Amino acid sequence: MTQIDPETDALVGDWLTLREAAKALNVSPNRIKQLVREHRLAGAVRDGELSIPAAFVTDGEIVKGLPGTLTVLADCGFAPEESLRWMFTSDESLPGSPIDALRANRGTEVRRRAQAMLL
């Protein structure tokens, strides 16, 4: 993984370090790395350490619909950093960002937009 660019870093806002993410999800740091490899989570290197957007975790769980959305984005050829940018960029048609919509339990709308990029 490469260092996150400042624009994407600012777009995401709050991050969890590998250890913080592991604690928030009650799993090992190695499990977080595996979830990133499997596209169930997306992360980036910040300050030399793998970090996960804090918005991807709620109440000790991965946000519902996030793994499926990240898989669709990977299938569309998105690199992890591009997926992060897409997830946190405002979309007038949702409204809000895709991660906001997922957190509001509107995952179907988000995945439709992601799948449309496959066509």
Image (tube, grey):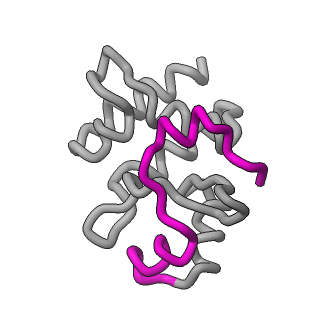
* Residue drawn where x is 78% and y is 50% of the image: 2
Q: How many marks?
A: 0
Quarter of the picture holding the N terminus: bottom right
Regarding residue 38, the answer to whether it shows in the image is yes
User: Is residue 27 shown above or below 35?
Assistant: below
Instruction: Write the residue at 54% across / 45% down.
Output: 70
Check the image and name the residue furthest to the left. Answer: 104
Where is residue 110, by image quadrant?
Answer: top left
Task: Give the quadrant of the C terminus.
Answer: top right
Q: Which quadrant holds residue 25?
A: bottom left
Q: Residue at x 59, y 79 (%)?
A: 29
Task: Using the rendered view, name the quadrant where residue 85 is placed.
Answer: top right
Instruction: Report if residue 11 lies within the magenta region.
Output: yes
| Between 46 and 69, the one nearer to me in the picture | 46
User: The magenta stretch spans which residues?
Assistant: 1-27
The percent coordinates of residue 96 (x first, y second) are: 30, 27
* Residue drawn at (35%, 56%) of the image: 63
Residue 76: percent from the left, percent from the top? 65, 31
Q: Is 65 placed left or right of 83 in the picture?
A: left
Specify whether 1 is left or right of 14: right
In the depicted structure, whether residue 58 falls above or below residue 114: below
